[in-house]
Amino acid sequence: MFCRRHVIGGILSTSAIGLLSLTGAAAGRAAAHPPLVAAAASLRSALPEVAAAFAAESGFSPRFSFGSSGNLARQIRQGAPFELFLSADEILIDTLAQARLTKDRGVLYALGRLALFVPRGSPISPDRGLAGVSAALEQGELRRFAIPNPEHAPYGRAAREALQHAKIWDAIGSRLVLGENVSQTAQFAATGSSDGALISQSLAVAPEFAGQGVYEVIAEKWHSPIRHRMALLPAAGDHAKRFFSFLGSAKAREVFARYGFSDPGEE
């Protein structure tokens, strides 16, 4: 229990010293535990680069939890301690905002692109796009084909729409392998567990996948726009707010562009 002493001759009281000690300890804990950010799996390669640029300016870097946007939104509803949510599906942000689980509707930060990724040795001709997938299917050479689970992954829904547009959704059904998120789906193709996959362009160009195969971007008109929206959550602190602002900066957009994301302002 603190003693009640007054400031005498410019010397801090015992109470003031105790208060400063508590404030310093709280600051130390905040520095030791940077904000936890929920981020769509399509950002797994791009976001660490953005965070590195941010750390060079701010001196700290957020922690990330990557997953399908649908699963991350479910975790937020269940009380996960996130301070910022970067979704690949703006509808999820809208739904959370209506439930007052975000500060507001946030902002669009990127437009994603769907890509056909084909590993080395695959029977699929990547330069033919989904026509190559259809040909391999008709010739009986396609064993497995991977897409993110459309139930909770935005790129999975886009993949389903693209396959429906190409009129091969029903025929390919028995050969589909569903990834928990777009990152796991890319792993299926890169490791040879599937003959090809529909994933985000951002992962197709990532160093860990770029050397494992080739990719072809799917025409945007073949699926609904993949609109990435982000929003701060009620628990967001100053560090999370600063990172949120940085994500709209020219430096961040430069990184996103290298990974195939379009600026929403160019929509």
Image: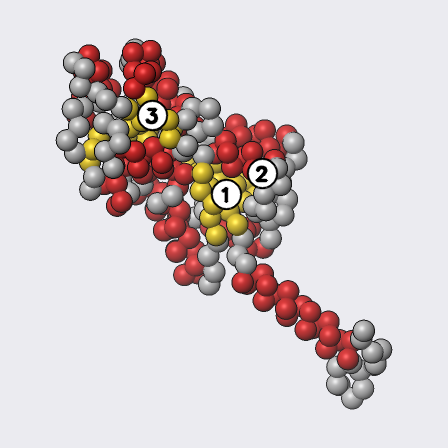
The secondary element bearing badge 2 is classed as helix
Q: Please rate how many residues cluster around mark 3, counting C-alpha atoms within 10 Å: few if below 14, some from 14 to 19, many from 20.
A: some
Q: Quadrant of the C terminus?
A: top left
Q: Position of residue 44 (x, y in %)?
A: 38, 43
Q: Is residue 230 visible?
A: no
Image-based side of 11 in relation to 97, left or right: right
Q: Look at label 1 and name its amino acid.
A: Ala
Asked whether disc 2 touches disc 1, contact meaning CB atoms under 8 Å apart, the reply is: yes
Mark 2, residue position = 76
Name the quadrant containing residue 256.
top left
Secondary structure at badge 3 equals strand
Answer whether labels 1 and 3 touch (C-beta < 8 Å): no
What's the distance in space between the residues labelled 2 and 3, CA to CA? Answer: 27 Å
Determine crowd level at label 2: few under 14, some 14-19, many 20+ residues with C-alpha closer than 10 A: some
Tell me the quarter of the image containing the N terminus.
bottom right
Q: Position of residue 206 (x, y in %)?
A: 28, 43
Sequence-first disc among 2 and 3? 2
Residue 126 appears in the figure:
yes
Q: Amino acid at mark 2?
A: Ile
Q: Which residue is mark 1?
A: 38
The type of residue carrying mark 3 is: Val
Could you give the CA–CA distance between mark 2 and mark 1, rounded to whole angstroms? Answer: 9 Å
Query: Which mark sits nearer the N-terminus, 2 or 1?
Result: 1
Which secondary structure lies at badge 1? strand
Q: Disc 3 marks which residue?
A: 177
Q: Relative to 64, say whether 176 is above or below.
A: above
Residue 132 lies left or right of residue 233; in this view the side is: left
Nearer-N-terminus badge (1/3): 1
Relative image position of residue 57 (x, y in whole percent): 44, 60
